[in-house]
Image (spheres, grey):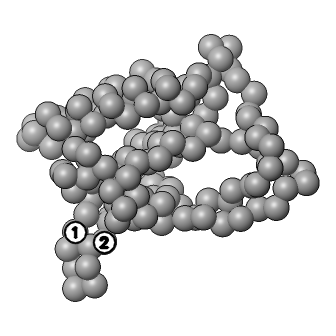
Amino acid sequence: MNSEDKKFEKLKVFLWNRPCYFCIIYRSKRSESGIELKWCKAVSLNFKSHEEYDNLAAKYQEIAADCYRRTRSIILEENLPDPNSQGERWCGFDLHVGPAHPHPANKLGQRWWHIVIGSGATYKAGYVIVARVAAKDEMELCDCVVEIQRIMAS
């Protein structure tokens, strides 16, 4: 197993203990039009076929590219839309302005969050990582991002 595969295996083991619903890893490639991202690895609880992963990766392509271009990482809590709020498109996501209505927590007090990592060691290695992870709060996810960066730097 090469060092890249070892990193991805460590990442998979780490995220699976969170729990993690899916993880997509995009690799940057130079092209005539600049830099483009293409998904290279993915793992999910429900998706099994290459076509399902293609569709999942296409859904998050825009936000992955935005984070890579800006060398940033973001954490987004999943919320139910407020019936009176207006939806707004941003990087492929429908965001709603107004009061937050978080999804109900599981028995461990965790809710679903999206993390997009396009900075630090992940960026330097030429990757962007997008994952849907369960956590109690944003601080828990910040610790998760730090650990992912440590894995990618190894």
Q: Residues within 10 Å of mark 1 (few under 14, many from 20)?
A: few
Disc 1 to disc 2, how far (Cα)?
5 Å
On screen, residue 116 versus residue 82, left or right, reads: left
Residue flagged by tag 1: what amino acid is it?
Lys
Please name the residue shown 42% across and 21% down the image.
17
The spot of residue 15 in percent (x, y) is: 39, 29
Give the structural element (helix, strand or loop) at label 2: strand
Q: Is residue 50 visible?
A: no
Q: Is residue 123 above or below residue 58?
A: above
The spot of residue 99 in percent (x, y) is: 80, 43
Quadrant, the C terminus: top left
- Earlier sequence position, callout 1 versus callout 2: 1
Quick check: marks 1 and 2 in contact, CB under 8 Å?
yes
Q: Is residue 4 above or below residue 57?
A: above
Q: Which residue in the protein does label 1 denote?
A: 29
- Which sits in the foreground, 89 or 7? 89
On screen, residue 26 versus residue 84, left or right, reads: left
Please name the residue shown 33% across and 56% down the image.
71
Q: Which mark is residue 36?
A: 2
The spot of residue 152 in percent (x, y) is: 22, 39
